[in-house]
Image: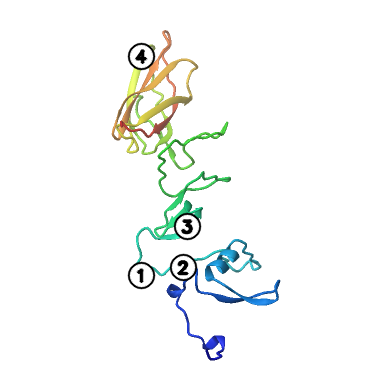
Amino acid sequence: MATKKITQLTSLAQVDVANGSDVLAIVDLGASETKKVTPQALVGSAASDMVATWNSVLTAFNGVKLNVTDTASDAASRLLSLQVGGVDKAFITKAGTMNIAGALVVSSVSTLTGAVTAVSSVKSTSATAGIGYGTGAGSTVTQATSKSTGVTLDNVCGTITMNNATLNRETAVSFTLTNSAIAATDVVVVNIKSGATVNAYNIGVTAVAAGSCRIQLHNLLGGTDLSEALVLSFAVIKAVAA
C-alpha cells in the first residue's frame, strides 16, 4: 500500500463504520508505541469520563448534543438508550418520549406543562405540603340578589361569597354552582371558610352533574335568624365510575 497523507485517504461514511471491527491508530504513551483501537472502544472509553470547561457567560454551551437527520427510521428508534447487561434502564424515543425503569427522584420544584398519567398511585410523604391545586387553579365569585341565586365559576377550586340575605332559623337554602370543570362522576367538596357564626350552619353538596353541582346551606339555630355573607371554599376532585 502506497504511503499517503491522512488528508489523502478516502473518507468513510458514518453508516459504513463497523464499530467493532474497523480500527483507528492511537499512541499509547504508557507503552511508548502506536496501537489500534476500534471506534466502539474509543468512544466508549471517552464517554465514561468526559471533561469540559465552560468559561463564557455569553455562550450557551451543550454538555452533550446529538442532532439526527431522520429521513427514514422505525418509529421505535431512540435518541438515547441506557442499558445494564443488555436490559433497558432508561431511553428516549425519537418522538421525545422518556421511559425510566427505576424511580424518578426530583429534588427541587418542577413544572410539568403537559398532562401526567400514573398507572399506579401518586403519593406525598410531606407532613405539610400534600397533594392539591396550585396558584392559578382557583378563582372567586360573589353571589348576587339572594342566598338561592346561582353562581358561575369555571375553576376546579375557589371561593364563593354568599349574599347576606336573611336565612331563617332551622331553614335550609340551596343554590347551583355552574362550573364547566365539573364532570358527572366528580366529587365536589365544600366548607365554610369565614363569615359565619360558630356552629350555626351545616353545608354540603347535595347533587353533582356534568357542568354543575347543588350546594345546600342549613341554619341550625333554633332561635336565631342569620344575615351573614358567608365565604365558602370548594374543590373538585376528579373521579371516574370505573
Closer to us: 95 or 237:
95
Is 12 left, or right, of 33 in this rendering? left
User: Which residue is tagged 3?
Assistant: 81
- Could you tell me the amino acid type at mark 4? Thr
Question: Which residue is at 35% across, 62% downward?
Answer: 74
Q: Residue 141: which numbered mark, if any? A: none
Q: Residue 71: which numbered mark, if any? A: 1
Instruction: Indicate which label's residue lies in the foreground, 1 or 4.
Output: 1
Which quadrant is home to the C terminus?
top left
- Could you tell me the amino acid type at mark 3? Ser
In 3D space, how far apart are the residues under numbered discs 2 and 3 (Cα atoms)?
Answer: 15 Å
Can I make out residue 41 in this image? yes
User: Which residue is tagged 4?
Assistant: 171
Closer to us: 1 or 161:
1
Indicate the position of residue 177 as horizontal and vertical percent values.
Answer: 34, 31
Whichever of callouts 1 and 4 sits on the residue coming sooner in the sequence is 1
In 3D space, how far apart are the residues under numbered discs 1 and 3 (Cα atoms)?
Answer: 20 Å
User: Which residue is tagged 2?
Assistant: 67
Can you say whether 47 is above or below 157 in the image? below
Q: Residue furthest front?
A: 1
Could you classify mark 3 by the number of other residues whose Cα lies within 10 Å: few (under 14), some (14-19), or many (20 or more)? Answer: some
Question: Which residue is at 59% across, 64% downward?
Answer: 45
| Quadrant in which residue 139 is drawn | top left
Whichever of callouts 3 and 4 sits on the residue coming sooner in the sequence is 3
- Could you tell me the amino acid type at mark 1? Thr
In 3D space, how far apart are the residues under numbered discs 2 and 1 (Cα atoms)?
Answer: 13 Å
